[in-house]
Image (cartoon, grey):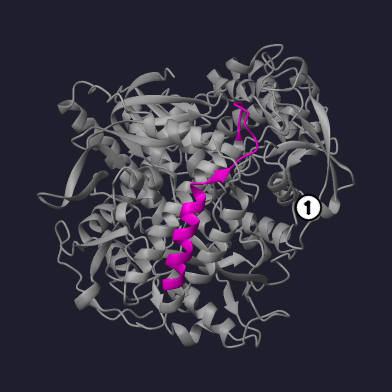
């Protein structure tokens, strides 16, 4: 079968905030770029971010990037790489102002400056009073940001391949990445897209959990592509459970609710966060708050007939504040919880939200893997940014509103790095003759599979298994059993059968391909979690309940082939300032 | 629950047809999208777009019992049976409930949907008062689902010439932004018997918008700006 080949300077896989920030950099520099996306760009999951973007503008309270850096290092439970964290926090104000100049409709303060609100884990003066650091457009910051970046890309004439799915990386014998194979959903055609640089910006894989705030499209496609081509996945045991997903529906209720003065209650009407985090209370780090909710439920203080959720109260706030600052939350609560938060509290539970781990990169977005010269050798031609990447700025636990910051800072940094690197790579390397074999074989297998597994059923069992075996609290026997169960599901995901054989917009085929990516993500998570015998950030084990810096102050690297684990040191040395040494983490 | 759903696969069907489904829902199935996903488990060939499942991405616009809406925020309890589902009207169908939105986005792009300000940017933010920013409320929240434009008879007749309510709402979003400097250019771009003035205030757009936005009001404001600059 003859495969169409197309040639670009840069192929970006994913049109969320990270991919589009990088695309803008490259388009404006005159490169021939294409951005592949499974959905129209403004439908990418960045659109669902609510609360804000962290930057120490100091518009409301005194602030500076060094305090932001401290909070981020502490929030990461010291697993974050301090050079990357310094890099991000230093650039935060600049990328936010730049976004404002692009037209972002931020809310405003009386003096005309960007509105900022407090968020969890933000402090002044290295652990002092609450800081007010999150720049917001009501509770629709992600929507406003994603549309602004798309609009700016329209201005820059960026080329998009809309409703295309990336399938596999094309690598040569030396390991350099030469392009990707991709599926055009409307026609069912597979193409080889040749590029001097490939940037993965495919977002997270939060759909591996049953209760998830994530969109259907968040299936870890970039991670699957990387893992299948021999690239390790870093720190996959660290998943953020957001404390406040709508009970039953999983839809996100922003931390901005607590930032604006809302708080959590148990069935006795008690503000239980005072017991778990005496100072920060409801604005402690997300891992801390999610564990507190889970403990309350476990100890019988949950609400409702099944005592299985808690209440998020904001009806003591002025209705005008709710309508002006939290209109989207009100809409969601009315639609998905059937309560009007102006009058009643919202039922909530911890819900899988964000993947701290991902494809290992340095702070320029270059993918780095262990090789002859050390643990972080650059893979030629491959870059990753956003939730699919692990730089690592979030370590073991991300702070709220640091993710939108991450995509802007590192989207831009990766764009700039690619521009530099392309000066040295003046031509496309010849694609190997086998470039598309792997992808075509996967599709041919799907087309001919008989008596296979149902995609929906395998996916359902996978999500339930992840939820039960790898949740907020983790247990040794459950993790062990989880590895066995997920391994079996990985096999099944490779033997799925679809009844729909149409070439045209075959969503059954897309979902089957997505399932193989989800399975990679799930297994990487379970194996990494089983092996890490300590509790750190979002990884909380029953049998090893404290952080163990002597043995575990290191990043996990999971290799799909052979399900092998390796480790590499945390970068404790920042770029210019003193290191923040690990210390006890309390809020 | 009973459904009657528009089906068409150009790979095998000569013409579209309506397919009946009768499925048992679970208590957790609250929204129309939940039901469609349950149908897809038994018939994986049913094709539709969906992503965020909370009404912010704008993927799952469709015609639901004769009215355009987003499946993910349409409560099942409010639907009369059999629930009749069709693709958004007026756009070419790619397959089943999936329409070709090229024309819709072409109109969106035609209004120059980006801030135009040719002054060198300041070192910090451009200032904007809360009152100036409030002009963008009810406008910037559009999710580009196309429910409004595909409910508009003027857009059905002239999708190539009439900008349509969604893109006009966005045209107003930039006209209303105190930071934008291209007011005259933007109005020139719409000064045309079709582009703006095909809106006859039928107000289907207002009636159908799943986000509760009001494109007609924005269109009237643009018309007002046109009048103002001629006198």
Pick the residue in front: A77 or A404.
A77
Residue under circle 1? B75
Q: Residue furthest front?
A: A451
Q: Residue furthest left?
A: A373
Res A239 quadrant in image:
bottom left
Image position, residue B66 (x, y; %)? 85, 35
Chain of the residue displaying label 1: B
Pick the residue in front: B91 or A3.
A3
Image position, residue A271 (x, y; %)? 57, 83
Q: Which residues are magenta?
A: A480-506
Q: Is residue B51 left or right of residue A155?
A: right
The N terminus of chain A is located in which quarter?
Answer: top left
| Residue A94 drawn in magenta | no
Q: Residue furthest top?
A: B193
| Residue A490 drawn in magenta | yes
What residue sits 56% from the left and 67% below the top?
A244
Q: Is residue A578 left or right of residue A512?
A: left
What residue sits 14% from the left and 66% below the top?
A578
Pick the residue in front: A287 or A461.
A461
Residue A124 is at least partly visible in this image: no
What residue sits 60% from the left and 20% below the top?
B187
Pick the residue in front: B110 or A373.
A373
Res B139 quadrant in image:
top right
Res B165 quadrant in image:
top right
Image position, residue A311 (x, y; %)? 64, 75
Give the vertical position of B92 relative to B73 (above or below): above
* Helix, strand or loop at mark 1: loop
């Amino acid at each position: 079968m003859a495969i169409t080949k197309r040639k670009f300077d840069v192929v970006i896989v994913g049109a969320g905030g990270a991919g589009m920030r990088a695309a803008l950099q490259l388009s404006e520099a005159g490169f021939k770029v294409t951005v592949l996306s499974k959905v129209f760009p403004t439908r990418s999951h960045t659109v669902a971010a609510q609360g804000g973007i962290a930057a120490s503008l100091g518009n409301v309270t005194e602030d500076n990037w060094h305090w932001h850096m401290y909070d981020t290092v502490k929030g990461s439970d010291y697993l974050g790489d301090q050079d990357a964290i310094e890099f991000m926090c230093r650039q935060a104000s600049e990328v936010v102002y730049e976004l404002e100049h692009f037209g972002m409709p931020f809310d405003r303060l009386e003096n005309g400056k960007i509105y900022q609100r407090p968020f969890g884990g933000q402090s002044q003066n290295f652990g002092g009073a609450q800081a007010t650091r999150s720049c917001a457009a009501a509770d629709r910051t992600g929507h406003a940001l994603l549309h602004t970046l798309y609009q700016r890309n329209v201005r820059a004439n960026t080329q998009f391949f809309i409703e295309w799915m990336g399938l596999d990386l094309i690598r040569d014998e030396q390991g350099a990445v030469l392009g990707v194979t991709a599926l055009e959903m409307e026609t069912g055609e597979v193409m080889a897209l040749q590029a001097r640089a490939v940037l993965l910006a495919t977002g997270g894989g939060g759909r591996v959990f049953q209760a998830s705030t994530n969109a259907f499209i968040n299936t870890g496609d970039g991670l699957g592509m990387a893992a299948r081509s021999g690239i390790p996945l870093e720190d996959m045991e660290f998943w953020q459970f957001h404390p406040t997903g709508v009970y039953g529906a999983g839809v996100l209720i922003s931390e901005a609710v607590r930032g604006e003065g809302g708080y959590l209650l148990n069935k006795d009407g008690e503000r239980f966060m005072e017991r778990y985090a005496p100072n920060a209370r409801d604005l402690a780090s997300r891992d801390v708050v999610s564990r507190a909710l889970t403990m309350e439920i476990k100890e019988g203080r949950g609400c409702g007939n099944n005592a299985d959720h808690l209440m998020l109260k904001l009806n003591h706030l002025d209705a005008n504040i709710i309508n002006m600052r939290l209109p989207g939350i009100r809409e969601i609560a009315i639609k998905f919880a059937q309560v009007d938060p102006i009058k009643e509290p919202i039922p909530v539970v911890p819900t899988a939200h964000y993947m701290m781990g991902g494809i290992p990169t340095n702070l320029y977005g270059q993918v780095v893997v262990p090789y002859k010269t050390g643990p972080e050798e650059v893979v030629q031609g491959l870059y990753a940014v956003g939730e699919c990447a692990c730089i690592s700025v979030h370590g073991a636990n991300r702070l709220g509103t640091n993710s939108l910051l991450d995509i802007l800072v590192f989207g831009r940094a990766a764009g700039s790095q690619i521009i530099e690197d392309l000066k040295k790579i003046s031509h496309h390397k010849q694609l190997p003759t086998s470039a598309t074999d792997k992808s075509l074989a996967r599709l041919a297998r799907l087309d001919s599979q008989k008596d296979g597994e149902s995609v929906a059923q395998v996916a359902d069992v996978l999500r339930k298994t992840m939820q039960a075996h790898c949740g907020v609290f983790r247990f040794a026997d459950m993790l062990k059993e989880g590895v066995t169960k997920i391994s079996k599901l990985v096999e099944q995901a490779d033997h799925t059968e679809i009844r729909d054989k149409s070439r045209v917009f075959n969503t059954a085929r897309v979902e089957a391909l997505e399932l193989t990516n989800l399975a990679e993500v799930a297994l990487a998570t379970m194996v990494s979690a089983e092996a890490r015998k300590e509790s750190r950030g979002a990884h909380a084990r029953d049998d090893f309940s404290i952080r163990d810096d002597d043995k575990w102050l290191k990043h996990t690297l999971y290799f799909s082939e052979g399900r092998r684990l390796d480790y590499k040191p945390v970068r404790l040395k920042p770029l210019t300032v003193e290191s923040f040494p690990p210390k006890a983490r309390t809020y | 629950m009973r459904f009657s759903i528009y089906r068409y696969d150009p790979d095998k069907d000569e013409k579209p047809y309506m397919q009946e489904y009768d499925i048992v829902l679970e208590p957790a199935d609250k929204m129309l999208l939940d039901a469609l996903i349950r149908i897809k488990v038994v018939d994986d060939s049913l094709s539709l777009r969906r992503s965020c499942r909370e009404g912010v991405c704008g993927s799952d616009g469709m015609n639901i019992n004769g009215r355009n809406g987003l499946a993910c925020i349409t409560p099942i309890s409010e639907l009369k049976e059999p629930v009749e589902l069709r693709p958004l009207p007026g756009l070419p169908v790619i397959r089943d409930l999936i329409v070709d939105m090229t024309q819709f986005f072409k109109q969106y792009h035609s209004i120059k949907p980006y801030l135009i300000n040719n002054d060198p940017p300041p070192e910090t933010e451009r200032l904007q008062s809360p009152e100036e920013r409030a002009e963008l409320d009810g406008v910037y929240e559009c999710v580009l689902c196309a429910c409004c434009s595909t409910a508009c008879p003027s857009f059905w007749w002239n999708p190539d010439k009439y900008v349509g309510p969604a893109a006009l709402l966005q045209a107003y979003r930039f006209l209303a932004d105190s930071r934008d400097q291209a007011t005259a250019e933007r109005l020139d771009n719409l000064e045309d018997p079709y582009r703006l003035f095909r809106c006859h205030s039928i107000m289907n757009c207002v009636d159908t918008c799943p986000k509760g936005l009001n494109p007609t009001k924005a269109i009237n404001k643009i018309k007002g700006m046109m009048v103002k600059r001629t006198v």
